[in-house]
Amino acid sequence: MVKVLRITADLSAPDPSALAAFYRDLFDLEIAMDMGWIVTLEGPAPGPQQVSLMAHGGEGIPVPHLSIEVDDLDAVYARVQKRAAPIAHPLTQESWGVRRFFVVDPAGRILNVLSHD
């Protein structure tokens, strides 16, 4: 059984830092990560309550709609392949320490499925 560790909404933003200021001011969210092109905000425990504000999806690819962190990425990837679901970004070990792929759901939304290695 695959365990979902967190689900984060991803919002496209030409200036993630400026949009982060808006969310921080309104909801007292704190910065969990800031890489320039992506800023992830979170609320207090017990959470996580998270939103990521992104100029792009990393390496210049499109911004996904949701990021879903799982404990067994290979198992989910195998399920995606079995269903022949469209892959929008191949299974990749990214330079910032996550392993991930993008899959397109039946409604056309892009899901960033990842694990921290």
Image: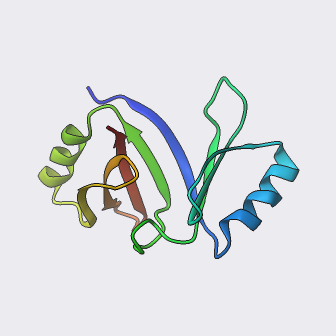
Instruction: State the residue at coordinates (56%, 66%).
Output: 37
Asked whether, in this view, residue 66 is left or right of residue 92, the answer is right
Foreground pick, 28 / 32: 32
Q: Position of residue 7 (x, y in %)?
A: 50, 42
Instruction: State the residue at coordinates (64%, 71%).
Output: 13
On-image quarter of the C terminus: top left
Foreground pick, 63 / 111: 63
Name the colouring of the figure.
rainbow
Instruction: State the residue at coordinates (66%, 23%).
Output: 46
On-image quarter of the N terminus: top left
Residue 92 appears in which quarter of the rendering? bottom left
Q: Position of residue 17 (x, y in %)?
A: 71, 63
Residue located farthest toward the right when viewing the structure as drawn: 25
* Circle count: 0
Instruction: State the residue at coordinates (21%, 47%).
Output: 77
Q: Position of residue 27 (x, y in %)?
A: 83, 45
Residue 47 appears in which quarter of the rendering? top right
Foreground pick, 32 / 62: 32
Residue 30 lies, with reference to residue 55, above or below; the image says above
Q: Position of residue 9 (x, y in %)?
A: 57, 52
Residue located farthest toward the left when viewing the structure as drawn: 82
